């Protein structure tokens, strides 16, 4: 008994393990991924128990200079959300990569380019024209646009990051170790990521490089709606065009474009459960290289475009084309979250004249 008490005392006196250091950064982002991190509620205390936060611009007043002064690899884990859209994002991504042992692309924007990546349908000149000339949020008759350098009246030089033509994913910028997809990642998957951090803090063990914190099956496998395996679409609808959406039946069978059939599972089918189609924010299912092309090919097979002998149910090529024409904004539909990370990467914009954009 006495010996047991001695052991208990020794246990109490055991030195706490050294906390891991984590950095959270946002690049081209809406802020939703940072909010998602806070959505884990009291579990955030688990993070605080195992980790010291050394950078979190959205929540704490750290300076980049402080991180710059840190030794290489002195941060254990960096959770990087947002796409890489300007020179500052790239500079900070490279700095955090140098200082961090583990780099995690957190959220669809960092993983695939996300919603900011749809900017790749245009270039800087076109985006500035829309934002500062055609639809400015303030009176701007002289079409003033952001400059990378300017002198104030007091003679002080101010600088702004250089806005690029093309949005990039994090792994097109620096080496990435792990991916947490989702726009934003769901609470369960954020907790999975916290679990990985906790295990790392305790044992130093990490998953294999390149691991994706989501499921290795596609969303249709997670979805409980009834599917018609012989489905053929006769008409494509947008959700508001249907008087009623059957909550039990596959949305695709009802003519609503749902990207679940080529999208990685792991979100709990949260949009489907709200009677809305999947837009693909978890990115492509494993083994799929190009998300948009995979969805397009799957939809094409349902339309009967792939195998002409199958087309008798659907109609002539003209009818099939008419059906495809019902897809409003095909690029924004099929590549909503993945354009920069896709094989297309961006829309090629021909210069209007020699030497132009
Ligand atoms: S992934 Fe979605 S929630 Fe996260 S920053 Fe990008 S747009 Fe916002
Ligand atoms: S296509 Fe969409 S609605 Fe149909 S089973 Fe797959 S995830 Fe569910
Ligand atoms: S249903 Fe699709 S769009 Fe909605 S959260 Fe899941 S993966 Fe993202």
Image: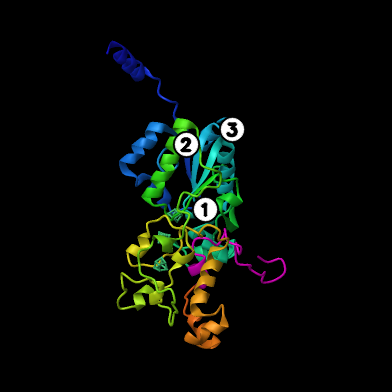
At 34% from the left edge and 45% from the top edge, which residue is drawn? Answer: 40
Q: Earlier in the sequence, mark 2 or mark 1?
A: 2
State if disc 1 and disc 2 touch (CB < 8 Å): no
**Residue closest to the far right:** 354
The answer to whether residue 282 is above or below residue 10 is below
Image quadrant occupied by the N terminus: top left
SS of the residue under disc 3: loop
**Residue of label 2:** 22
State if disc 2 and disc 3 touch (CB < 8 Å): no
SS of the residue under disc 1: helix
Out of 32 and 319, give the one closest to the viewer.
319
The answer to whether residue 79 is above or below residue 246 is above
The answer to whether residue 179 is above or below residue 327 is above
Q: Earlier in the sequence, mark 3 or mark 1?
A: 3
**Residue of label 1:** 111
**Camera sees residue 125:** yes
Q: Ligand 1 closer than 8 Å to the CB at disc 1?
A: yes
Q: Position of residue 166 (x, y in %)?
A: 59, 59
- Crowding at dot 2, Cα within 10 Å, few <14 / some 14-19 / many 20+, comes out as many
Ligand 3 located in image quadrant: bottom left
Image quadrant occupied by the C terminus: bottom right
The answer to whether residue 317 is above or below residue 156 is below
Q: Is residue 209 a member of the stretch shown in magenta?
A: no
Query: Is 56 on the left-hand or right-hand side of 41?
Result: right
Q: Position of residue 22 (x, y in %)?
A: 47, 36
For the residues marked 3 and 2, what is the alpha-carbon distance in whole angstroms? Answer: 14 Å
At 34% from the left edge and 47% from the top edge, which residue is drawn? Answer: 39
Read off the magenta span.
330-357
**Camera sees residue 62:** no
**Numbered tag placed on residue 72 in the rendering:** 3
């Amino acid at each position: 008994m006495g010996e047991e008490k001695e052991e208990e005392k020794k246990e109490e006196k055991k030195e706490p393990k050294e906390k891991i250091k984590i950095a959270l950064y946002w690049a081209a982002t809406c802020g939703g991924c940072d909010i998602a991190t806070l959505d884990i509620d009291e579990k955030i205390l688990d993070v605080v128990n195992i980790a010291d936060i050394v950078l979190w611009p959205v929540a704490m007043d750290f300076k980049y200079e402080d991180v710059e002064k840190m030794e290489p690899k002195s941060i254990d884990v960096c959770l990087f959300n947002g796409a890489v859209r300007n020179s500052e994002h790239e500079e900070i991504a490279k700095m955090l990569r140098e200082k961090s042992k583990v780099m995690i692309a957190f959220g669809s924007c960092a993983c695939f380019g996300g919603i900011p990546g749809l900017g790749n349908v245009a270039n800087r000149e076109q985006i500035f024209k829309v934002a500062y000339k055609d639809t400015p949020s303030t009176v701007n008759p002289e079409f003033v646009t952001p400059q990378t350098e300017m002198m104030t009246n007091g003679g002080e030089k101010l600088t702004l990051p250089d806005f690029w033509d093309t949005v990039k994913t994090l792994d097109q910028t620096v080496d990435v170790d792990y991916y947490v997809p989702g726009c934003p990642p769901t609470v369960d998957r954020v907790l999975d990521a916290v679990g990985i951090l906790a295990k790392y803090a305790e044992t130093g063990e990490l998953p294999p490089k390149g691991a994706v914190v989501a499921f290795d099956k596609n969303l249709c496998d997670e979805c409980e709606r009834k599917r018609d395996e012989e489905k053929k679409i006769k008409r494509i609808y947008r959700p508001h065009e249907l008087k009623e959406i059957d909550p039990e039946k596959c949305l695709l069978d009802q003519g609503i474009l749902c990207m679940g059939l080529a999208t990685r599972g792991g979100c709990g089918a949260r949009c489907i459960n709200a009677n809305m189609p999947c837009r693909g924010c978890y990115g492509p299912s494993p083994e799929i290289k190009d998300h948009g092309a995979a969805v397009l090919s799957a939809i094409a097979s349902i339309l009967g475009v792939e195998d002409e002998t199958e087309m008798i149910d659907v109609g002539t090529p003209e009818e099939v084309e008419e059906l495809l024409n019902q897809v409003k904004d095909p690029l924004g539909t099929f590549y909503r979250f993945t354009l920069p990370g896709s094989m297309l990467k961006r829309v090629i914009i021909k210069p209007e004249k020699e030497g132009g954009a």
